[in-house]
Amino acid sequence: MKREEIEEKVKAFLIDDLEVDEAVIKPEAKLKDDLGIDSLDFVDIVVIVERNFGFKIKPEEMAGVVTLSDFCDYIERNV
C-alpha cells in the first residue's frame, strides 16, 4: 500500500469516525494536542486500523507516535 493511500484512509476515518475537523489534519499535527484524540478514541483507532489495514496495533509500539506523520509511518511499517 502506498503512503498516499494510507494518508487518505487515515484522514477519512479521522473525519468520519472521530469527527476531527479537516482543517487541523496536517502531518505535523499532534494526535492528542492538535487533533483532540483521547484514550477512548485510541480504542476506536485500534479497531479501525485492524479493519482498514489488516493488523493489530500494539500499544507498546505506539509510545513514540506523537504526530499524524508518526502514525502514518507506523502504519506504513506494519502493512
Image: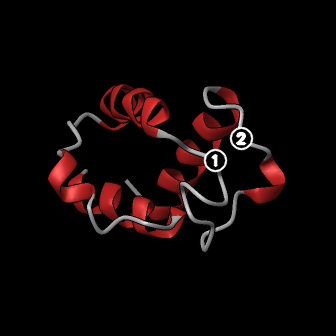
- Measuring from the top left, give residue 34's x and y in whole percent: 67, 60
Give above or below for 74 relative to 13: below
Give above or below for 79 relative to 54: below
User: For residue 71, which quarter of the picture?
Assistant: bottom left
Image point (70%, 37%), residue name:
15
Image point (53%, 62%), residue name:
68
C-alpha span from label 2 to label 1: 8 Å
Say if mark 2 contacts mark 1, CB within 8 Å: yes
In terms of secondary structure, where does tag 1 sit? loop
Query: What sort of colour scheme is used for the picture?
Result: secondary structure
- Measuring from the top left, give residue 3's x and y in whole percent: 46, 63
Residue holding disc 2: 20
How dense is the environment of label 1, judged by Cα within 10 Å: few (below 14), some, or many (20 and up)?
A: some
Amino acid residing under circle 1: Gly
In primary-sequence order, the first of circles 2 and 1 is 2
In terms of secondary structure, where does tag 2 sit? loop
Give above or below for 79 relative to 68: above
